[in-house]
Amino acid sequence: MMNSATNNLPKEESSILESNNVSFYYIHEEEKAVIDASFKIQQGDFIGAIGPNGSGKSTLLKLAAGILQPSKGELYYRRQAINDYKKKDFAKLAAWIPQEASMVFPFKTQDVVLMGRYPYKSGFNFETAEDLEIASEAMELTGTKFLFGKRFTEISGGEKQRILIASALAQKPETLILDEPISFLDIKYQIEILEILRVLNQKHSVTVIIALHDLNLASKYCSRLLLLKEGQIVREGSPNSILEKSIIESVYETQIKTLTDEEDGSLIVLPRTKNN
């Protein structure tokens, strides 16, 4: 269900998402949030955007999701400028998942998931049997069927994020773009959500682009990292090449030490204190 026809293209055939010297500023040109960002993302990548607070991670992802328009430069999705897509057409390709849900109306969880079918609707049509089947499969993939019938406003933060991912999957996208979806969750829910994303990435060919604060989780789950500082992409590459001591100390302006996890070879980043 999750794979559209474009999901079957060979990864090396083309970039799925490309940014060419994109800049964005909120008020005037002297206050740029993103500066001359250029990168290419291939289908099947699991990309992590990392960097200090205020480095431009969320803004960059909102540009990639078509929520913000570049002040300069252009972003392309499958060789077409994102701005040239109709909103519903782009929503069938890429789904946006915010940092936290702001929903206050007590919708039931299954209704929130069904909201992901909006790109396929016209007017006020009721849900079809296909919509219900797709929503049910999305809840199955995210392990949220046990929440069926519960009010969205009454479930935990981790459960809300899983429902939001299920809603995004109901769009049948080939790419998920997530803005720090685990920042306010305890480690149990952080791992649960990242494991869901890993399964979607590895078994269902979903491209994942995610902003993360936790460098150690970024090291374990991401195939590549974009490291930002003051609105600029300063490094791009594999986690082990980006999380080198000298690089992280320079960007985060703090002393660290790194260890290697013997189980998977990923780097572990630890802050240095006066006692170590």
Image (spheres, rainbow, N blue to C red):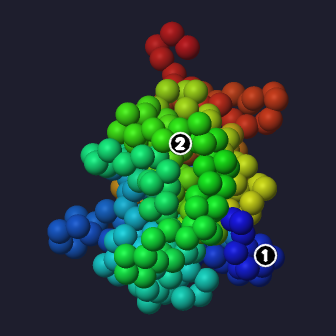
Residue at the spot x=78%, y=78% of the render? Answer: 9
User: Could you tell me the amino acid type at mark 2?
Assistant: Phe
Percent across and percent down for residue 226 are 55, 57
- Which numbered circle lies on residue 17? none
Look at the image and tell me whether residue 52 can be seen: no
Residue at the spot x=71%, y=56% of the render? Answer: 201
Percent across and percent down for residue 264 are 80, 35
Answer above or below: position of 171 versus 209.
Answer: below
Q: Quadrant of residue 240?
A: top right
Placement of the N terminus among the 4 image quadrants: bottom right
Disc 1 target residue = 8
Determine crowd level at label 2: few under 14, some 14-19, many 20+ residues with C-alpha closer than 10 A: some
Determine crowd level at label 1: few under 14, some 14-19, many 20+ residues with C-alpha closer than 10 A: few
Q: Are marks 2 and 1 in contact (CB under 8 Å)?
A: no
Disc 2 target residue = 148
Q: Nearer the viewer, mark 2 or mark 1?
A: 2
Residue at the spot x=46%, y=13% of the render? Answer: 274
Q: Distance between the Cα atoms at labels 2 and 1?
A: 32 Å
Residue at the spot x=42%, y=82% of the render? Answer: 122
Of 177 and 111, which appears nearest the observer? 111
Percent across and percent down for residue 4 are 70, 75
> Is 235 situated left or right of 85 in this image?
right
